[in-house]
Amino acid sequence: MANINMTPVKTPMPHQDPKVRARNFQEVALGYTEEMAIGEAKRCLNCKHRPCVSGCPVNVRIPDFIAKVAEGDFEGAYQVITDTNALPAISGRVCPQESQCESKCVRGIKGEPVAIGRLERFVADWHRTHAAEKIAKPQSNGHKVAVVGSGPSSLTCASDLAKLGYQVTVFEAFHVAGGVLVYGIPEFRLPKAIVQSEVDKLKAMGVEIMTNMVIGKVLSIDELMEEMGFEAVFIGTGAGLPRFMNIPGEGLAGVCSANEYLTRINLMKAYLEDYDTPVLKSKAVAVVGGGNVAMDACRCAQRLGAEKVYIVYRRGEAEMPARNEEIEHAKEEGIEFMNLCNPVEILGGVDENGKPTGRVAGCRCIRMELGEPDESGRRSPVEVPGSEFVLDVDTVVMALGTSPNPLIRSTTPGLETNRRGCLVVGEDTVSTTREGVFAGGDAVTGAATVIKAMGAGKKAAAAIDKYIQNK
């Protein structure tokens, strides 16, 4: 026990100064140094029962990789992680470790848990900058699998199948592979060069990436299987269909979904002057919602030059589904939180002659209070009569959640969905109602975490392998 670091708190993560980072898109968290990583790794007690592993959707052997870090064997730690996790540089940045592996950590009983996510990120970054990785193309087993979409579940599924020798082709609707990792998560949380490096690894393993391929329009699932010879198909198309409130004024110019807003900024680089991507130039922005997407949208709005940015959320801060880290970062950067408020109408402006401009000129909100718990266990918000007020904004971004796009289900006979539009799967959680077609990630669960999507992709790869080998 002499070598155990019994400090009760995590080694702090270095960050950009809030006033500086609020006006740039560079990564906020700067990462551990080698000394910091070793010191934090020595906080791990290497518990016999390994409770942290049970909290990881891809079952990373957490104590084993942390032990390697404590020894200074960073490459060894990377090999341990990537035995089960194909995307550690990504999951180390965006995975909600605080509610998964770290929530099970014994050190968290009398202090803070070991910073598992920060160590995972450190190991992946160290490997990327220090190791001369030689990726060998696995020997082909003669079988073909199609992967639809290129987000975290698809990348994981494709990686695991390629390692088994399958000829994998990934079909991506956008012009760049990466799915939500490139269109949804801002550069300051997940640098796109990291995503691209993971895509490049897949290509080196022999995976073919076909972009601008909207399955359901360019090709159907039937054509992939019956005409192109794919023996199985994995659908990992995510949940990219935004929800709106259906209140008056939502059709005004200046109202958009967080999906569109973030896609223009992240994928189409609207924040860079040398990209001709139109995006709303706002003075005051209201972002409606309380999840991670809402935090991403409000922090992007701030970085694009808005003078005032508000989070408008109908419940209290304690009920916000966003990660605590993202909430704290947003506050540090000057975002104003308007909890227990809800929009009831978006107001249009008028010109000097009194004619409607068709553009947003304000957002009428009403104050809320928490009543009885709803079906999810969260207390239901109830309007406070007579508490309406107008928020002076020229842009409203709706970050109210998403559902799967209906395109594939509407063009694929025999593919069942539930009332939320998610694909129906069997007891193994990845087999759809169509033989040979598997699915995972947000297309099945609705909007969830990156690491859970990765876990589904991993499970699907094993199920596809078993299905084809049994055939």
Image (spheres, rainbow, N blue to C red):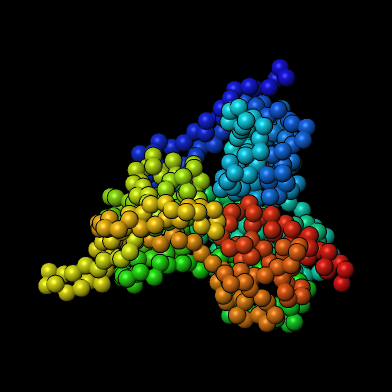
Tell me which residue sits at (20%, 73%) in the image: 356
Residue 263: percent from the left, percent from the top?
46, 62
Answer left or right for 394 relative to 401: left
Q: Measuring 14% from the left and 72% from the top, which residue is drawn there?
A: 354
| Number of disc labels | 0
Residue at figure coordinates x 75%, y 82% from the top left: 226
Residue 317 vertical position relative to residue 471 in the rendered view, above or below? above
Query: Is residue 359 visible in the rendered structure shown here?
Result: yes
Q: Position of residue 175 (x, y in %)?
A: 54, 67
Residue 200, located in which quarter of the rendered image? bottom right
The answer to which of 214 and 109 lies nearer the viewer is 109
The residue positioned 24% from the left and 63% from the top of the image is: 361
Residue 155 image offset from top left, x and y in percent:
66, 59
Q: Quadrant of the N terminus?
A: top right
Query: Residue most toward the left?
Result: 353
Residue at the top extreme?
A: 2
